[in-house]
Amino acid sequence: MTEQEIQRINELYHKSKETGLTKEEADEQADLRRRYIQAIRASLRGNLDSIHVQEADGTITRLKEVGEKNRRPKDAVSETGGEYK
C-alpha cells in the first residue's frame, strides 16, 4: 500500500463526512480499505512469523510452532466440563 493510497483513503473519508460520496467513490473507498487491511495483516503475519521463543530446555522454536502445539482441539472441553467458546 503506497502513501498515495493511504492519503486517498483519508481524502475519501473526509469527503464522506462533508458532502458524501458518489457510488464510484464509495466503491473506491471500500476497495482501498480492503487492500489496506490486507497489507496490515500481511505485515503482522510476517512480523509474527519471524519471532522465535526459547523454551525452558534451551531449544528455540518458531512462535507459529509454539501456537500450534498449545492450540486447543476444536472439540475441547474446559476443566469445568463446559465447551470453550
Image: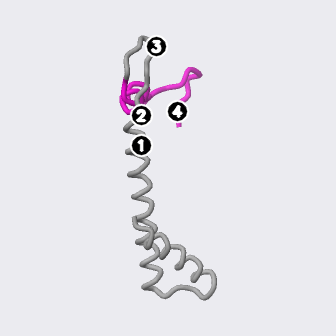
Query: What residue range appears in magenta?
Result: 61-85
- Real-space CA distance between mark 1 and mark 3, rounded to the nearest whole angstrom: 23 Å
Contact, mark 1 vs mark 3 (Cβ under 8 Å): no
From the top left corner, tell me how far across and down residue 65 is, in percent. Answer: 36, 29
Q: Earlier in the sequence, mark 4 or mark 3?
A: 3
Q: Secondary structure at mark 3?
A: loop
Q: Earlier in the sequence, mark 4 or mark 1?
A: 1
How crowded pointer 2 is (Cα within 10 Å; few <14, some 14-19, many 20+) is rated as few
- Real-space CA distance between mark 2 and mark 3, rounded to the nearest whole angstrom: 16 Å
- Real-space CA distance between mark 2 and mark 4, rounded to the nearest whole angstrom: 27 Å
Q: Amino acid at mark 3?
A: Ala
* Residue at image mark 4: 84
Contact, mark 1 vs mark 2 (Cβ under 8 Å): yes
Residue extending farthest top: 57
How crowded pointer 1 is (Cα within 10 Å; few <14, some 14-19, many 20+) is rated as few
User: Which quadrant is home to the N terminus?
Assistant: bottom left
Tell me, for residue 47, which label it has, or none: 1
Q: Main secondary structure of the magenta part?
A: loop
Q: Amino acid at mark 1?
A: Asn
* Residue at image mark 2: 51
Q: Secondary structure at mark 4?
A: loop
From the top left corner, tell me how far across and down residue 72 is, in percent. Answer: 44, 28
In magenta stretch: residue 35: no
Q: Amino acid at mark 4?
A: Tyr
